[in-house]
Amino acid sequence: MSARQVWKKCTFCENGRRRCFNCGGSGKVGPSWQTCYDCKGIGTVLCTECGGAGGRRETIWKQE
């Protein structure tokens, strides 16, 4: 058996970041439009599924 590693893209985010749930991606919250404390005003946060990597390595085994 031979093995090779392939990169699987994360299906939960785009390039390791996902839209902030708290502000909806605007970077502002509240009635006075203060800076969002979760994303610091950026509008995106690191993906918790892939840890911000944007994907994961997966080993594929192939019989010869």
Image: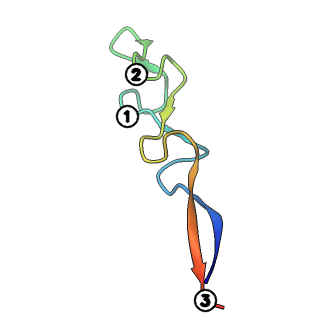
Q: Where residue 32 appears, x then y in whole percent?
A: 37, 8
The outermost residue toward the front is 1
Residue 6 placement, left or right of 24: right
- The one nearer the camera, 50 or 18, is 50
For label 3, the SS is: loop
Q: Where residue 49 appears, x then y in whole percent?
A: 43, 47
Tell me the kind of residue under disc 1.
Phe
Residue on which the image places disc 2: 38
Residue on which the image places disc 1: 21
Residue 10 placement, left or right of 30: right
Number of the front mark, 1 or 3: 3
Tell me the kind of residue under disc 2.
Asp
Give the color scheme: rainbow, by chain, secondary structure or one colour.
rainbow
At 64% from the left and 65% from the top, the residue drawn is 5
Tell me the kind of residue under disc 3.
Gln
For label 2, the SS is: loop
Q: Are marks 1 and 2 in contact (CB under 8 Å)?
A: yes
Tag 2: Cα neighbours inside 10 Å, few (<14), some, or many (≥20)?
some
- The one nearer the camera, 21 or 5, is 5
Which quarter of the figure has residue 53? top right
Give how far apart the Cα atoms at labels 1 and 2 are: 9 Å
At 43% from the left and 32% from the top, the residue drawn is 20
Q: Are marks 1 and 3 in contact (CB under 8 Å)?
A: no
